[in-house]
Image (spheres, helix red, strand yellow):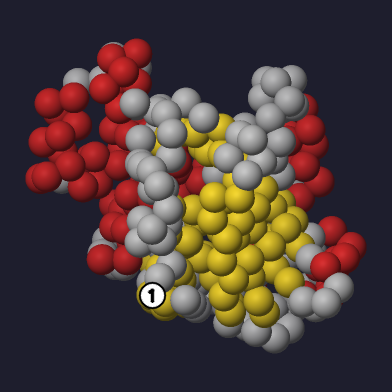
Amino acid sequence: MTHIKKIVSASALLLWSASIEISLLPLTGWARTYLPQESAVLAKEEESDTVRQGLPGRRLGGGTRSGVIFSHEDDYLTALVAQDDLGITTASHPSFMFYVPAMVSDQTAEFVLRNSSDELVYETAFRVEQAGGIISVETATTGIAALNFNENYHWYFSIIPEINDRANDVAVDGIIQRVDPEKWFIQQEVDVTLLEQASEQNPLLHARLLRKKADLWHDAAIALGTLLQTNPNDVEVASEWHQLLETAGLTAMPNTYKPAIRTCLN
């Protein structure tokens, strides 16, 4: 059974400033905070095509179709991925995170994973509640084979308002590649002993090292998502989460956001 984690149900925002103030805001308020300049974000993604050397991918989904699904036309489905749309992971069965804005009603979501030969590896569909939130799709319990090292897998995530007419789908997609951790850490000159100790003793430091030292943005995001689930009121975790989003161009304000956590299963 696929595990679908809803990391945001009501979007609790934690404002980090000289004094710490906690306030609860609607989930759509968060969407408009970290995606206020959608055209600029899209422009950056277009400019990154050369850097990505033709790799397919789109982090934002919506545009003229947003009004069909989302409560506000200027809200966008967002894949929480690195800025070049390429996710590098050491996980044999990686997880994927997506931000779904508040919607006009409950909707059907679909996740698809294909290998480099465009063969179907995994496909699942599930309901997403009207309130939306950050959805984490986990493949660890799906029974699929471990991802091959150094192979590009293409994933797709769609919100489907009309199952018999897919023209109105709002979708995002990107590439994920599994790397051999031993070789990768040598290449990145990572202190593996420190990384292992942090994994056991200091999960927050471990997530920070994954991003800053190992250049594993995707794995750091999943690690922080887990920490947010178990430590929803931890200011340091919230701050690290904001910094992670900021490095990927997923936030436009220097505030720190702490999502409320709730888990649901497919």
Q: What residue type is labelled 1?
A: Thr
Q: Residue at x 32, y 58 (%)?
A: 226
Q: In which quarter of the image is the N terminus?
A: bottom left
Q: Where is residue 150 in the image (x, y as percent from the top left)?
A: 47, 26
Q: Where is residue 18 in the image (x, y as percent from the top left)?
A: 37, 53
Q: Residue at x 38, y 75 (%)?
A: 263
* Residue density around tag 1, few if under 14, some if 14–19, many if 20 or more, within 10 Å: some
Q: Answer with the quarter of the image where residue 207 lies.
A: top left
Q: Position of residue 192 (x, y in %)?
A: 18, 24
Residue 58 lies left or right of residue 82; in this view the side is right
Image position of 33 with respect to 107: above or below: above
Image position of 134 with respect to 253: above or below: below
What secondary structure is found at the residue carrying circle 1? strand
Residue 244 lies left or right of residue 198; in this view the side is right
Q: Where is residue 10 in the image (x, y as percent from the top left)?
A: 50, 78
Nearest the eye: 173 or 101: 173
Question: Mark 1 = which residue?
Answer: 263
Residue 226 lies left or right of residue 107; in this view the side is left
Is residue 248 at all visible to an observer of this figure?
A: no
Image position of 207 with respect to 163: above or below: above
Nearest the eye: 261 or 240: 261
Q: Residue at x 83, y 68 (%)?
A: 166
Q: Residue at x 71, y 44 (%)?
A: 58
